[in-house]
Image (spheres, helix red, strand yellow):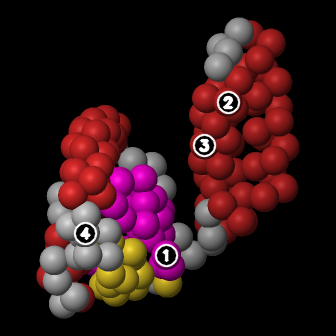
Amino acid sequence: MTSATKWAIVRVLITTVYLMAGWILFTGSVSLESVLMGVAFAGVVALLTFDSFIVESEASWKSLVPRLHWAVAYLALLLWKIYQSSFAVAWLILSGRYQPRVVHFRTRLRSDIARAALATSITVTPGTVTLEMNEDHLIVHWLDASTSHSRYAGKLITGWMEPALRKLWG
């Protein structure tokens, strides 16, 4: 068996696991029938579409599977940041002291999945919306922009997220 075939099998298995996790989240059931049906559908979809989910040139296993303890910590911090930011944004809007601006900055994250997680985390945090992500370049609408300097704006927006995602996906 060639290394390309082995890597294809690994990509199918990883895609199946991710799709199965989505199946359980959407159905909300872990009964035997539901899990068996989910495994069957996830397996078929993974066989047909694994190339779309995980490109052949993806660097390594570490860049696809997050470290569980860092994932739990990241999600807890993200939920706290969403909670905290919702009050800050409400105060900005009620006081009328916001300064919206579109800022451009680069990320140092190398993994595509880590970059997508960063863009999603920025978007779900109140007051910021990722408008575009192109390789390592992000364009973000920022409700309370305190600077237009790209590197400083990137540090203020990403804050703790970028180092945490680097630990999460290696």
Closer mark to the observer between disc 2 and disc 4? 4
Give the residue drawn at x 39%, y 76%.
140
- The residues colored magenta run 107-133
Identify which amino acid the numbered label 4 is placed on. Tyr
Closer mark to the observer between disc 1 and disc 4? 4
Q: Earlier in the sequence, mark 2 or mark 1?
A: 2
Closer mark to the observer between disc 1 and disc 3? 1
Is 95 left or right of 72, judged from the image as shown?
Answer: left
Q: Which residue is mark 3?
A: 18
Q: Which mark is residue 98?
A: 4
On screen, 75 above or below 154? Answer: above
Q: Which residue is mark 2?
A: 26
Q: Earlier in the sequence, mark 2 or mark 4?
A: 2
Q: Which residue is mark 1?
A: 131
Q: Is residue 89 magenta?
A: no
Circle 3 crowding by C-alpha within 10 Å: few under 14, some 14–19, many from 20: some
Alpha-carbon span between mark 2 and mark 4: 37 Å
Is label 3 in a helix, a strand or a loop?
helix
Is label 4 in a helix, a strand or a loop?
loop
Q: How far across and how far down the image is residue 145, in percent? A: 23, 76
Alpha-carbon span between mark 3 and mark 4: 39 Å
Identify which amino acid the numbered label 2 is placed on. Phe
Identify which amino acid the numbered label 1 is placed on. Leu
Alpha-carbon span between mark 2 and mark 1: 27 Å
Task: Give whichever of 52, 2 is nearer the camera.
Answer: 52
Identify which amino acid the numbered label 3 is placed on. Tyr
